[in-house]
Image (cartoon, rainbow, N blue to C red):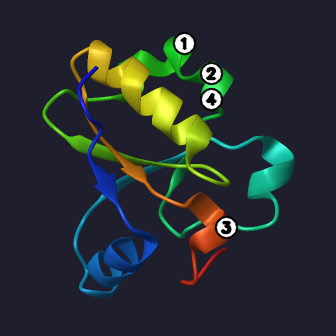
Amino acid sequence: MEEIQIITPEELKKKLEEGVKLELVDVREHEEVAQGMIPGAKHIRMGEIPANLDYFDKEKEYIFICRSSRRSENVCYYLKDQGYKVRNMIGGMLEWTGETK
């Protein structure tokens, strides 16, 4: 199986601070995102990803986020198999030190 590209929370925070336009998708459950999400992230629960494929554009790269990076990694493998450009935020929200909303 091909490796999934990753981004560290530090790299992501730096890109956001520099104003880089990124496509962030948080795949956690509703009660988890209620505790805070990275500003600008779109919330699509992991179980709802297959039903929301029309949201994704194969020309864009998406960064997936969850609590620890395990679920987002699974989503990345699934979407990569469908032909999408994906990247997993390693360590998930447990490692995120940036702003949340």
Q: Position of residue 60 (x, y in %)?
A: 19, 40
Q: Quadrant of the N terminus?
A: top left
**Do the residues bearing badges 4 and 1 touch, measured as CB atoms within 8 Å?**
no
Q: Earlier in the sequence, mark 2 or mark 3?
A: 2
Q: Earlier in the sequence, mark 3 or mark 4?
A: 4
- Residue 94 is tagged as 3
Quick one: 3 or 87, which is closer to the camera? Answer: 3
SS for dot 1: helix
Res 46 quadrant in image: top right
Furthest residue toward front: 1
Residue at 80% x, 44% y is 30
How much space separates mark 1 and mark 3, taking CA atoms?
27 Å
- Residue 46 is tagged as 4
Q: Amino acid at mark 2?
A: Glu
**Do the residues bearing badges 3 and 4 touch, measured as CB atoms within 8 Å?**
no
Q: Amino acid at mark 1?
A: Ala
Q: Nearer the viewer, mark 2 or mark 3?
A: 3
**Do the residues bearing badges 1 and 2 touch, measured as CB atoms within 8 Å?**
yes
SS for dot 2: helix
Q: Position of residue 69 (x, y in %)?
A: 56, 49
- Residue 84 is tagged as none
SS for dot 4: helix
Q: Amino acid at mark 3?
A: Leu
Q: Amino acid at mark 4?
A: Met
Q: Earlier in the sequence, mark 4 or mark 1?
A: 4
- Residue 51 is tagged as 1
Q: Which residue is mark 2?
A: 48
Label 3: how many residues lie within 10 Å, few (<14), some (14-19) or many (20+)?
Answer: few
How much space separates mark 4 and mark 2, taking CA atoms?
5 Å
Quick one: 77 or 61, which is closer to the camera? Answer: 77
Label 4: how many residues lie within 10 Å, few (<14), some (14-19) or many (20+)?
Answer: some
